[in-house]
Image (cartoon, rainbow, N blue to C red):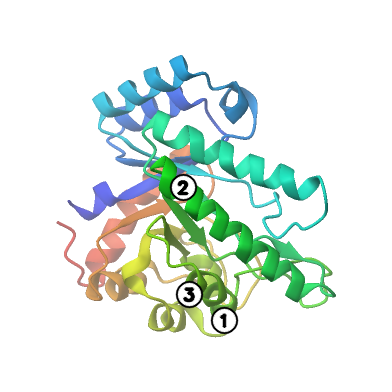
Amino acid sequence: MALLERIGIDFGRRLPLEQAIAWAAGHAVRFIDVQLDTGQNRVSEISDGRASAIRRQREEAGVTLGLHTLSAVNVAEYSPFVSEAVDEYMRAYIDVAPKLGASWIVVHAGYHFTADVKPRMEAGRDRLKRMAEYAEKRGARLLLENLNKEPVDAEVHYLAHTIEEWHYYYSSIQSPALALSFTANHAHLMPEGVQGFVDSIPLERVEEVRLADCFRNGHEQHLRPGEGDFDFGALFSLLEGRGYKGHYMNAFGTIEDMEQARHDMVRMAQGAMVESR
């Protein structure tokens, strides 16, 4: 598959599922991400009949669909009642994925409040393990994303934003239903950078690479290519040179921005001597 075909668009909550698939098909976009938390896409609003129709539409259009859970839902939750609700939320995504024919669900490790790192990490690890086991039974696939750093003096920090934290989760969950989603721009914010992350992670478990521009060692931004200092050509050279065959996912700006950037990125890859076909 040509590189252009492997670069997808994260629609997030921008369009109803049916419209997102139709837009992607009309612009020859093969891979898309959609969130099921709001509006017509609320996971609780998708009936079996609608799911079947969406699955047929997706298959006929040749569009590969992925789902993306909300990082604001704290997978590291341990409080009574709220903890059970997080489980229910994740199971709902897992249940609907095969009905829609979704190929993956991006999940997160949650966040802590500075003084409770250990119990939060343990709660998140145990929840992700339960959800991976549940996904195995339902025929769904989870992709654990590395999240972004927050300012040092912030009280709340995302988990799995460092190499060590991310490793804590995926090394302890060897389920065939759990793979990885590598957000390269999040790695660009860390001291090790993209190279350090790629050198440290099991690339064979990475099935998606998420892309946006930002500034080296800066803060969380999802900029259009060229608005930051991220070297997309170097990224493609590194990953393609290591044998990465999965898809990429643009996550920034407008739908039109992400579509235009697909073509720009191919040119950047070619400039870095990466074979684009």
Q: At which x and y percent is residue 231?
A: 41, 71
Q: Is residue 126 left or right of residue 241?
A: right
Q: Measure the alpha-carbon separation of dots 1 and 2.
A: 25 Å
- Pick out the residue farthest to the top: 49
**Residue at 60 percent of width and 71 percent of height:** 161
- Residue 140 falls in image quadrant: top left
Please give the residue where the numbered disc 1 appears in the rendered image: 164
Residue of label 3:
171
Give the mark, 2 or 3, whose residue is nearer the N terminus: 2
N-terminal label among 1 and 2: 2
Within-10-Å neighbours for mark 3: few <14, some 14–19, many 20+: few
Is disc 1 surrounded by few (<14), some (14 to 19) or many (20+) residues within 10 Å? few
Report which residue position mark 2 lands on.
Answer: 135
Local secondary structure at mark 1: helix
The location of residue 158, given as percent across then percent down, is 68, 65
Q: Depth check: 111 or 271 in front?
A: 111
- Where 7 falls versus 54 (above or below)? below
